[in-house]
Image: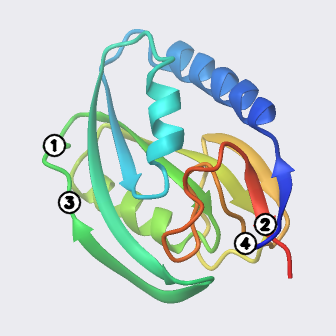
Amino acid sequence: MEKIKVLISQQEIEKKVSETAERINRDFKDKKLFVISILSGSVVFCSDIIRKLNIDFELDFIRVSSYKGKNSSGEIKFIADTAIDMKGKDILIIEDICDSGRTLSYIKDLFIKRKANSVKICVLINRNSEKIKNVDIDYMGFNIEKEFVIGYGLDCDGKYRGLPYIGKLED
């Protein structure tokens, strides 16, 4: 079994999820929100966020891929699209991590082209790395240095998603 160093505790995550959901509740209190979770990594974060929402919302999912193991492939593969007609809708994209900005920029631009009224982005982790594409993050959990992290939905080749904290594999 690999050794894992905890970087962000379960308690820190729970506190940040509550704070983020409160902000979303305030910002969308008089609107119907369409939450789009990017599978598979964001499902844990998204589940915790939506359980704390007390506003009118619908939930759908998309699936994209850009990672193989610990490395970005540099290509965005759209595997499954949303069923929501975005025209005139307020969209909140929920993602596990923003690294290069490429994936979130691509998805946001696509939703804008589909004539969404607004497109906001909520990420659990923003990795402090050189962004290839600038993307505005409206709701951010944590900034981390350029490390490959696992847990709380984040994986390495499909493993470690169920950890209640965010950590990194020790060598």
Up/down of 144 relative to 142, above or below: below
Q: Residues within 10 Å of mark 1 (few under 14, many from 20)?
A: few
Q: CA distance from mark 3 to mark 4?
A: 36 Å
Q: Along the polypeptide, which appears first: circle 2 or circle 1?
A: 1
Q: Amino acid at mark 1?
A: Ile
Q: Which residue is mark 3?
A: 81
Q: CA distance from mark 4 to mark 2?
A: 13 Å
x, y (%) of residue 94?
47, 45
Element under disc 3: loop
Q: Which mark is residue 168?
A: 2
The scheme the figure's colours follow is rainbow
Q: Along the polypeptide, which appears first: circle 3 or circle 4?
A: 4
Q: Amino acid at mark 4?
A: Met
Question: Which quarter of the rendered picture does the C terminus lie within?
Answer: bottom right
Q: Nearer the viewer, mark 4 or mark 2?
A: 4
Q: Is residue 115 left or right of residue 119?
A: left
Q: Which mark is residue 84?
A: 1
Residue lying at 72% horizontally and 30% vertically, measured from the top left: 16
Farthest-out residue, front? 1
Residue lying at 59% horizontally and 48% vertically, measured from the top left: 123
Q: Nearer the viewer, mark 2 or mark 3?
A: 2
Q: CA distance from mark 2 to mark 1?
A: 36 Å
Q: Residues within 10 Å of mark 3 (few under 14, many from 20)?
A: few
Q: Along the polypeptide, which appears first: circle 4 or circle 2?
A: 4
Q: Which residue is mark 4?
A: 1
Q: Amino acid at mark 3?
A: Asp
Q: Are marks 1 and 4 in contact (CB under 8 Å)?
A: no
Q: Along the polypeptide, which appears first: circle 1 or circle 4?
A: 4
